[in-house]
Image (cartoon, helix red, strand yellow):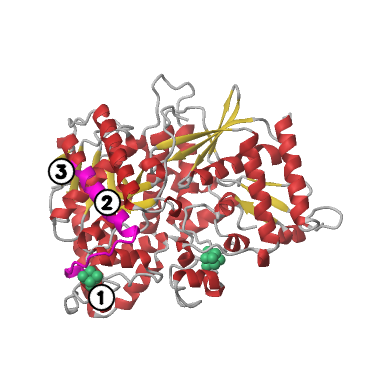
Amino acid sequence: MRVNDWLVELLSSEPQVRREELSELRDAIDAEATSLLDASGVPVDDGPVVVSKSRLAQLDRCERSTVASWEATTPPEPPSVSALAGRALDHFVAQVLVGGRLRESSHDLRAALVAHGDHEALGRIDEWEGGDDGVEFDRCIDGLAAAVLDAWTGVDPSWAPRTQVPAVTALAGGRLRVSGVVDVELGGPHTTRPGVVVEVKSGAAAASHRHETYLYGLLVALRDGTAPAVVAQWYPGTAPAGVAVTIGVLEAAAERLLAGVRQWSRLLAGAPPSASPGVWCGWCRVQEDCDVAPVADGGKAVAVGDGDEAEYTPEVEGEQPW
Amino acid sequence: MVSSAATRVAARLEAGLDEVLGDAHRRGPGGPGRSADLRRDRLVIRSHDLLEPCPRRASRPADDYEDRVVTTRRRVGLLVLRRLWGEAPPVPPRGWRVDPGALGPTVRAVFDTPDVWPLQLWEWTRSLDQAGRAALAAGVVTWCDGVIRLVGTARDVSWCDPSLPIRRDVPGRAVGLAATLDATRRTMEGERLLVVTGAASPTARRVLAGQAVLVRTAVARRDRVARVTLAMPPSGQLEHHVVDDALLDLAVDRVVEHAALRVRPDDAPPRPSRSCVHCHLLDECDAGSEHLGCRPGVVAGPAAGRPVDDQDRRHQGTST
Ligand code: SF4
Ligand code: SF4
């Protein structure tokens, strides 16, 4: 299904969350976050506790691995085929939404990576060239590019599509910063269209993706003071899977967020992290020192998160435009 | 007309620089006369230099600027906003606001109008292939949309021309102060400044606001600035700073402190933190290496020395 056709069906969607409900939810999150940080023992002088969407996803997988990445003083391992495919998908969607077309997937991806100065990814692609990984990668991104062209061509400009949009909220008097980068935003309170948030996913569908999308809905709602009407995930070759944003959806996101804040602040205060093995052990930094890791089987890494999530600390409410 | 506040601040700046620089970076008798010497001798202090928490790193700023989407989207975005606002009706109707749906076509129109671009930026853009330009356009659309979301109903805005860096030389000194400034508005009570930023800490934002006013008034001896507003698209917030003595004094003191570090880099103490992992000096800094728990040199991988913010350095005068 073309995304534009799906959007046409959403034209009459109304935000279902009242501003007062959102404001109450924000106050409740703020109060709970404050008491969690107070109870955790994280020193205030250490600066704000930062909880990004990718950190929440990491914590869901394995605490020990999350702490190891946070403490790491060396750059992470170079991206795997599937991690780079995730980046390629984001670039393709942006290119089609703004430039209107894709020509040749590997050429276009390289051009986007050059523009972004993503030397790490370019170097990795060069390394793969001529080998099995290169063949696999090219096949993978050819399929992604075709799916993006098919789905994302022709989105009506009145939806004001934008990509890789940061959304950041400061809570607990600035002691906590929650951040994420939304793959695609459409419409919203400054346009004539309902607000729609789409998370673009290159891998197989997973239950956790729905929660990530809810979290984006919450972050955008807190940023704009108005909840989006719909949040959705889009997987190549499928129609967007949308959910109307209700206060229940935002409460579910808030609950998961606060659980992550509790977990992360406890770890920052020095609690021993637990180790939870899974397919992710294949790209864990401390795998060699971990006694619960399964024997390495060359398993492939999956998407590694949003990368450069900008983090900001808003402080002052400003209702008047400048 | 020069206000008394501007005169007072200019005097404070002059006295502060006299104290820390002495005869270094002085113009006129004893200082560089020819413009080539002046260019070489000029000390440029940019807004984001003042935000560097480690004195040692502040004393030797990295010179690793690279044109890429994140470092250029703001300048291209300003071209787009200038065009969008320029297309507004002379007397906009009540309830007017910029249409974000027009962003895509306007970005394309700007890409087809070479004469409005700073030359070097235009050349870089032309070096990109069509997909690279689409990647830049996508970054510009997102940046502009964030700004429009916050200030899209303000009509009488003058967006800054990215070809004209906001930089002023301190009178009598080969010292240039450069500020991040995105737009201005004239109001009855004075000029208002707008700075679009992602600065995280309240202190950093105050320094950015102060430096913008300092460059606009005290150094340039322009008319009064009434207010600075910081627009923060990622958090959807506007933060207003009233221009008072405290704000200006903070800006002057930060500039003077920074100038002292730059002329005596060997005296600048290290202040290690987690950000050492990105520092271009890590290879030679024992304190940073110790903080990271490793020997000097072993952690300087691809991330080392990478700029960690979205400050547009060339726009602020790094190329001097
Ligand atoms: S190897 Fe697996 S279980 Fe062990 S820390 Fe890493 S991710 Fe966790
Ligand atoms: S390594 Fe750390 S302490 Fe040393 S100069 Fe860089 S930021 Fe400062």
Magenta highlight on residue A278 = yes
Compare residues A7 and B170 and report the one nearer the observer: B170
Compared with B59, B286 (above or below) is below
Magenta-drawn segment: A252-280
Q: Of all residues shown, which one is farthest toward the top? A: B94
Q: How far apart are the alpha carbons under marks 2 and 3?
A: 29 Å
Q: Are marks 2 and 1 on the same chain?
A: yes
Q: How far apart are the alpha carbons under marks 1 and 3?
A: 37 Å
Task: Point out the tag, 1 or 3, that comes first from the N-terminus.
Answer: 3
Amino acid carrying label 3: it is Gly
Quadrant of the displayed image that contains ligand 2: bottom right
Residue B197 rendering spot, x and y as whole percentages? 48, 44
Residue located 67% across and 60% down the image: B262
Magenta highlight on residue A253 = yes
Residue A262 - label = 2
Nearer to us of marks 1 and 3 is: 1
Residue A287 - label = 1
Residue A242 - label = 3
Residue B229 rendering spot, x and y as whole percentages? 51, 35
Secondary element type, mark 2:
helix
